[in-house]
Image (cartoon, rainbow, N blue to C red):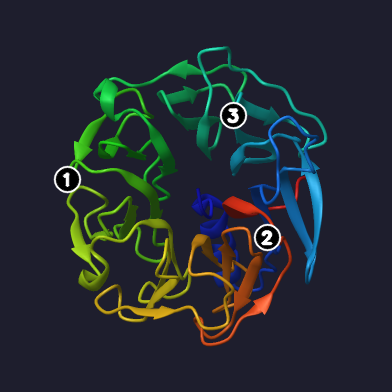
């Protein structure tokens, strides 16, 4: 889930370069229009959407009840990946057409991640990898026990090629060889989400199912609990400000939006102005400093420019947003 950091770091480097003009990234949402849906009824444009302006979103595809993740190849932006209930979907033309290169063994895919020429998929049955730009995928679970293979999130370390972290039902697993082999890092517990700081690549956060929030300051090797007041809370998503690693936000189930301005040492719950305390996804804006996107559970997407003191509605009422990502426009 979350912002694909290769794209963000490229943007920040472009901004820093003298005389450079950075290309803005576009916000995409992988979602399900779930409110009021009855099994067997016609789907209402569930899948990948792109924000055009204010509350206006454009449906990109693939119309499916479960599209839960999106990523783009940082070297080939027209190559896009989707995590779908029936497999990994790959587009070589920026989303105009899609194919499913995976077979019947790859279902309930929860997330996808990409680095140049490579892609990774986390599913209910473990991890799969592609080394040919998404044309083929092979199973990659060496080192992950069968009972721990349900993978909610998969992330590429933006500072080290072929270093991958997986959020599984059995904890955080790390691969140093492009998902060919894995080792567990930290405690054995269900992990929902992983996120890496763009300005401090050794800094990672993990949101868990019923065990609170965790932070790693050594690249994900060791983990320590943070936000002790919320140590039994479920956190669906975590995001770090791409310009300031001290600013962190987390999406919780029941406690609303939590924010920290001191690197996760202290946290404040901010739910006033939101229609529900159940938050499904959060993401800092890649283009506008300080802006935070907050996706509630079936009550719409909101933005805040003051870390949750005030909110503005941004559409998508009735949806579950599984993933938010800033990606470059495809050529």
Q: Residue at x 24, y 76 (%)?
A: 265
Q: Could you classify mark 2 by the number of other residues whose Cα lies within 10 Å: few (under 14), some (14-19), or many (20 or more)?
A: some
Q: Earlier in the sequence, mark 1 or mark 3?
A: 3
Q: Name which quarter of the figure residue 237 lies in.
A: bottom left
Q: Residue at x 27, y 25 (%)?
A: 147
Q: Secondary structure at mark 3?
A: loop
Q: Residue at x 59, y 62 (%)?
A: 11
- As measured in the structure, the alpha-carbon distance from the residue carrying label 2 to the one carrying label 1 is 36 Å
Looking at the image, can residue 201 be seen? yes
Q: Secondary structure at mark 2?
A: loop
- Measuring from the top left, give residue 78's x and y in whole percent: 72, 39
Residue, disc 3 = 85
Residue, disc 2 = 25
Q: Quadrant of the C terminus?
A: top right
Taking 39 as reference, is 103 left or right? left
- As measured in the structure, the alpha-carbon distance from the residue carrying label 1 to the one carrying label 3 is 28 Å
The one of 184 and 18 positioned closer to us in this rendering: 184
Number of marks drawn: 3
């Amino acid at each position: 889930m979350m912002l694909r950091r290769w794209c963000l770091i490229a943007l920040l480097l472009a901004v820093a370069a003298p005389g450079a003009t950075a290309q803005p990234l576009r916000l995409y949402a992988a979602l399900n229009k779930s409110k009021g849906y009855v099994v067997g009824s016609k789907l209402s444009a569930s899948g990948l959407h792109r924000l055009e302006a204010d509350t206006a979103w454009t449906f990109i595809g693939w119309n499916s009840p479960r599209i839960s993740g999106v990523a783009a190849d940082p070297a080939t932006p027209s190559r896009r990946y989707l995590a779908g209930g029936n497999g990994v979907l790959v587009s070589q033309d920026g989303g105009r057409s899609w194919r499913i290169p995976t077979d019947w063994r790859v279902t309930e895919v929860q997330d996808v991640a990409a680095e140049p020429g490579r892609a990774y998929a986390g599913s209910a049955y473990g991890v799969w990898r592609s080394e040919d730009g998404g044309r083929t995928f092979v199973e990659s679970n060496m080192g992950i026990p069968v009972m721990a293979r349900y993978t909610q999130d998969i992330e590429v370390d933006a500072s080290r090629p072929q270093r991958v972290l997986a959020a599984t039902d059995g904890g955080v697993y790390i691969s140093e060889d492009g998902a060919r082999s894995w080792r567990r890092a930290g405690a054995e517990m269900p992990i929902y989400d992983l996120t890496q700081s763009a300005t401090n690549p050794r800094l990672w956060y993990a949101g868990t199912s019923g065990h609170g929030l965790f932070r790693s300051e050594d690249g994900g090797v060791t983990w320590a609990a943070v936000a002790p007041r919320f140590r039994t809370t479920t956190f669906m998503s975590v995001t770090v400000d791409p310009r300031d690693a001290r600013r962190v936000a987390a999406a919780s189930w029941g406690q609303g939006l939590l924010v920290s301005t001191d690197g996760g040492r202290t946290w404040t719950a901010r739910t006033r102005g939101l229609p529900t305390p159940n938050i499904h996804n959060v993401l800092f804006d890649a283009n506008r400093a300080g802006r935070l996107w907050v996706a509630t559970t079936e009550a719409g997407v909101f933005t805040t420019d003051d870390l949750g003191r005030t909110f503005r509605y941004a559409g998508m009422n009735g949806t579950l947003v599984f993933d938010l990502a800033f990606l470059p426009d495809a050529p």
